Amino acid sequence: MTVHATQLNKAADWLARSRRVAVLTGAGISAESGIPTFRDALTGLWERFEAADLATPQAFRADKALVWGWYEWRRMQVLRSQPNAGHRALVVLRQRVDDLRLITQNVDDLHERAGSPDVVHLHGSLLHPRCFACGHPHVLPDGIPDEPEGGRSIQPPRCERCGGYVRPGVVWFGESLPTLAWSAAERAVRECDLFLSIGTSGQVFPAAGLHQIAAQQGKPIIVINPGEMASVQSRELCLRGPAGEVLPALLARWA
Ligand code: BV8
Ligand code: ZN
C-alpha cells in the first residue's frame, strides 16, 4: 500500500470531524474477495464479449441462455466468496459516525454479509431475479450453483405466474435505476458532510454523477482506489491503495 501517512492522517481527521457520511462503492471493494471488476476482461464462454454488451436487455433477447449462464456463473462466484476487510471496515465506520449511508453499484451481497444494514443497491442484485415479462419475483433453488469454471449456456427458468422467462434482478445498461434507490442516494449525498468513494472507476452514469454532486456542493471527498484517478478537486483526498488495506488503516488512525 503506497498511501502516505500524512494523507491517511488527513483523511482520518476529516472522518473524525464528519457526522453524516455518504459512501459510494463499486466493483473495486469486492475485488479482494475474488470477484472480478468490470474492468477485468471476461473469461471462458464470455471472453469475446464486453460486460457492458452482455448486461443489456438486447443481449438477453438475442441469447437468453448465454446471458442467464453468465449471471448464474457470477452468482456462483459471489456465493462462494466472503466479505473482505474493506466491507467489514465500513461496518465499524458506521458505529463511529452519527449517520452513514452506504450506496453501492455492486450486485453482490457482500456488504450485507459483512453486517451493513440498509445498503442502497443502485444496480440491483444477483440474488433477486424476476420475470422479464410480468416482473413477478422468482425464487431460486437454495445452494450454490455448480457451474463449470468456463461457464455454460443455461436456459433461464420460467415464471410461475405467466410462464415468461426469468431475468436477473439487476439494472441493465439502457434501463432506469430503481427510483427509490436513486432518490435515497441523491438525498444521502446532498445531506452528507463527507463523501467517501471506494473502488469505482466513475464511468457509469448516473451513479458516477453522485461524485460530481458532492464536488459541486463543495463537500470534502475521500477517494480510495489503487488505480490512476481522474483530476482531484480542491477538497478531495485520493488514497491510492486497495480498500481492504486502506480502510482498516484509516480506522486504526482514528483513535
Ligand atoms: C440509465 C448491473 C436512464 C448489471 C450495471 C451519461 C453519459 C454517458 C453515458 C450515459 C449517461 N447516462 C446514461 C448513460 C448510459 C449508461 C452508461 O453510463 N454508460 C457508460 C458505460 C458510458 N448508463 C445506463 O445505461 C444506466 N441507465 O442511464 O437509464 C436511461 C434509460 C434509457 C435511455 C437513456 C437513459 C444504467 C447503468 C447501470 C448498468 N448496470 N451493473 C451487472 O452487473 O451485470 S453497471 C456495472 O458497471 C456496475 O454496477 C458498475 O456500476 C459499473 C462498473 O463500474 P465500477 O463498479 O466502478 O467498476 P470498474 O470495474 O469500472 O472499476 C473498478 C475500480 O476499482 C477501478 O477504478 C479499479 O482501479 C478499482 N479497484 C480495483 N481493485 C481495487 C479497487 N479499488 C479499491 N480496492 C481494490 N482492491
Ligand atoms: Zn411472469
Image (cartoon, rainbow, N blue to C red):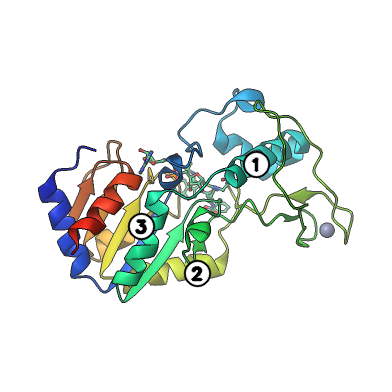
Of marks 2 and 1, which one's residue comes earlier in the chain?
1
The answer to whether residue 27 is left or right of residue 243 is right
Q: Amino acid at mark 3?
A: Ala
Q: Is any part of residue 240 visible from this angle?
A: yes
The quarter of the displayed image where residue 228 is located: top left
- Location of the N terminus (image quadrant): top left
Give the image location of residue 210, x and y in percent.
37, 59
Q: Amino acid under label 2?
A: Asp
Task: Indicate which disc residue 76 carries.
Answer: 1
Image quarter (top left, top right, bottom left or bottom right) of the C terminus: bottom left
Q: Quadrant of residue 153?
A: top right
Q: Earlier in the sequence, mark 3 or mark 1?
A: 1
Tell me if label 3 and label 2 are in contact, CB under 8 Å: no
* Label 3 sits on residue: 89
The residue that appears at 38% across and 50% down in the rendered structure is 85
Mark 2 — residue?
A: 118
The residue located at (24%, 51%) in the rendering is 249
Q: Residues within 10 Å of mark 2 (few under 14, many from 20)?
A: few
Q: Is mark 3 within 8 Å of ligand 1?
A: no
Instruction: Tell me the amino acid under the disc marked 1.
Output: Met
The answer to the question of whether label 3 and label 1 lie on touching residues, with beta carbons closer than 8 A, is: no
Q: Residues within 10 Å of mark 3 (few under 14, many from 20)?
A: many
